[in-house]
Image (cartoon, rainbow, N blue to C red):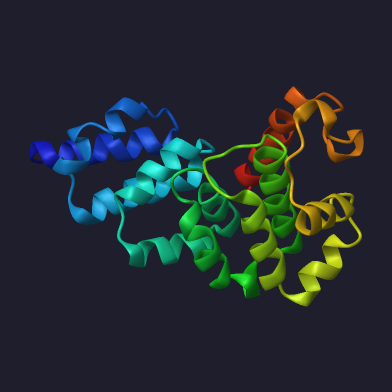
Amino acid sequence: MDISTNQGVVALHIVTALHIVIASLQSRLLDHLSPEERLYLLEDVFKKTRWIHVQRFCLSRMSADHWEVLLKRYPLKFLRTCLFWPWQRFFLDSINKVWDRLPKENFTCLLHIIICQKVLERLEDFDYVNLLREFWYRSPEHLKQYVERTDIFKIMMKIIKNGFRTHPENVPGNFFLHDSKFFNNADICDRIIRTIVKVQ
């Protein structure tokens, strides 16, 4: 067994055991693996991690064709990654490819990420209000009907209709669905989403 194969076996065992040293993943280790081993390693790490920055790294080392495979296998995990800088420009095109296989609960999770972790946080790395509008307008009717029965619907419709430029101190209390304190709301939302993503 040569050194590169040996490294590949070690890397696969590391991933399987989930004792990933991220620095090793981003080192030259991937360069010493065969294309098949590299793809297996990247997909396995993408599947098992909840860390957005690690998922982005894995995607950055894959072809667009393999992105499609991951999008179809793990739609929430892939789309969640696309809601974080600098991948937002891929979100709407990606969602258009999986409307037919996106569970209604995952659709609601994506709305929570956009509203609780982006819009209410007033992040300025992307136009999240416009992204929310486009996402909603493109959504299939059965997903819209499901969301109409959830607690996020009225908040979302106000943001879609009026935009959102409110200072955090002036946000209506009912907009914070996870905690009444502004600074806890996004963190709790993220923890809930990570738990859901973990089982996908």
| Residue in view at x 34 percent, y 64 percent | 64
The residue depicted at 54 percent of the width and 47 percent of the height is 126
Instruction: Evaluate whether residue 200 shows in this view.
Output: no
Q: In this orientation, does residue 199 appear?
A: yes
Horizontal placement of 82 versus 195: left or right?
A: left
Between 111 and 48, the one lying in front of the other is 111
**In the image: residue 110, left or right of residue 60:** right
* Residue 136 image position (x, y, % from top left): 71, 65
Q: Of residues 76 and 121, which is closer to you in this image?
A: 121
In the depicted structure, whether residue 154 falls above or below residue 64: above
Quick check: 75 left or right of 17? Answer: right
Question: Relative to residue 124, is residue 13 drawn left or right?
Answer: left
The relative height of residue 87 versus residue 169 in the rendered view (above or below) is: below
Q: Quadrant of residue 161?
A: bottom right
Q: How many marks?
A: 0
Question: Does 184 appear above or below 164?
Answer: above
Q: Which residue occupies 52% across, 41% down?
A: 125
Instruction: Pinpoint residue 165: horizontal percent, then vertical percent.
Output: 73, 41
Outermost left residue: 2
- The location of residue 142, given as percent across then percent down, is 80, 74
- Residue at 45% x, 33% y: name it: 18
Q: Which is more toward the observer, 10 or 30?
A: 30
**Residue closer to the observer: 45 or 1:** 45
Which of the 4 image quadrants contains residue 175? top right
Q: Residue 22's spot in the image, x, y percent?
A: 36, 29
The answer to whether 145 is drawn above or below residue 38 in the figure is: below
Q: Quadrant of the N terminus?
A: top left
